[in-house]
Image: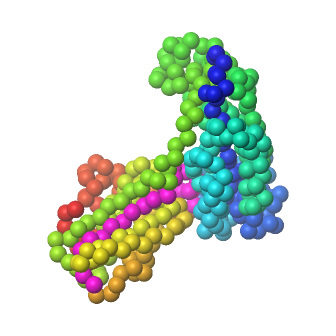
Amino acid sequence: MSPVPESQIRHIAHFDLDSFFVSVEILNNPSLKGKPVAVGGFERGVVAACSYEARKFGIHSAMPMRKALQLCPQLIVTNSSRGDYSKYSRWVTDIIANRVPKFEKASIDEFYIDLTGMEKFFGVSNYTRDLRELIRKETGLPISCGLSSAKFISKMATNEAKPNGFLEIPPGKEKEFLWPLGIEKINGVGKQTELQLKSFGLYTIEDIARTPVELMEKYVGRWGESLWQKAQGIGNAEVETDWEQKSMSHENTFDKDYTDIPFLHSELVRLTERTAYSLREDEKLTGCITVKIRYSDFETTSRQETIDYTSLDDTLIAKVKDLFAKSYQQGRPVRLLGVRFSQMIPFTMQMSLFENNLEKLNLYKAVDDIKGRYGAGTVTRAAALRNKDEE
């Protein structure tokens, strides 16, 4: 790879809160520190996250909790701080947002930051270290960080820096960092792809780099070119910022004005269900809900509140009804209702692994599948059936 001119070099940092759910539990209960801890559902649940002490026993995320307890009978299982996960995530988000020009919230505990251009005013390496230290001091959360010229390299550097460390890959040193690593270190290479590549004699990233791209495509299809480019240190450096601005909404203008509360509630349920369906289709969680009310004289009000990140209908419907109750001026005829979700982040598997959410989420996904096959209106809550008005 020919040298990139200094003016074209990108500086991308990747921040990852170490064992985020466990770290929050320890902050709220310091007696858990240094002990094997798993966060998730009990009995029929699975491990959402685990401490490094628990990992020594072979425990990992998505493992059935029953098996985890067999591997480590003294394992401490908890999820008592669930309500604080979103709070701490937003805290870190606010710290980052106030100190960098451009960032992407990739999940509840993971961030990409574009520091390109800041080298003119600050030392990018020192600035990244200082920001990481600030987050650690203010929140008490351990956090690891990688810095390089591409998002995937920075993420890999973060993984090598864990726990609670920092690793910088200077421009021009990408291959030096990547090539000795095993192919399983590449983001997105699962067990099946790993075994497939190893069957062709490819064990390290250097092995992939030295394999003709045409042969890589023969081995793993269209993904072969992407793997080959990553092995050369070539990757995307574009930090997406629309995660915060993007929103989903549905609203309905009635054919006549209504004051009937049961009718208005049924409409709110229907609108929330539709928007939640779109949310799950896009594999997102929402962290903010807005309810819009337009009265018969066209006066329009809206009220919004932040919530714990979710995509579950019952949680969203309860909050929508609560916002409506806080906003609606009793007795005034309503012309329009709307529901909007914003502050969306990509869905992370861990968010679905708590016992009390898993069955609900599987149910909603099954319903989503029916809607996807036969139409969005084929399955709905009884509470939403009162209103048949078209949008």
Work out whether residue 160 can be spotted. no
Q: Which residue occupies 73% across, 55% down? A: 135
Q: Is residue 340 magenta?
A: yes
Q: Which residue occupies 67% across, 46% down? A: 15
Q: Which residue occupies 28% across, 87% down? A: 331
User: In the rendered view, does 3 fall on the left or right side of 337?
Assistant: right
View extreme (front): residue: 121
> Which quarter of the figure has residue 177?
top right
Q: Is residue 205 magenta?
A: no
> Which quarter of the figure has residue 151?
top right
Relative vertical location of residue 113 with respect to residue 268 in this rendering, above or below: above
Relative vertical location of residue 185 with respect to residue 118 in this rendering, above or below: above
View extreme (left): residue: 255
Task: Locate residue 181, reporting x and y percent.
Answer: 71, 27
User: In the rendered view, does 181 fall on the left or right side of 318?
Assistant: right
Q: Which residue occupies 46% across, 23% down? A: 222
Count of numbered labels shown in the rendering = 0
Query: Is 205 or 360 nearer to us in this picture?
Result: 205
- Location of the N terminus (image quadrant): top right
User: In the rendered view, does 75 fall on the left or right side of 107?
Assistant: right
Q: Specify start and end residues of the magenta stretch as a single range.
A: 332-354
Relative vertical location of residue 29 with respect to residue 109 in this rendering, above or below: below
Query: Is 172 or 145 nearer to us in this picture?
Result: 172
Work out whether residue 98 can be spotted. yes
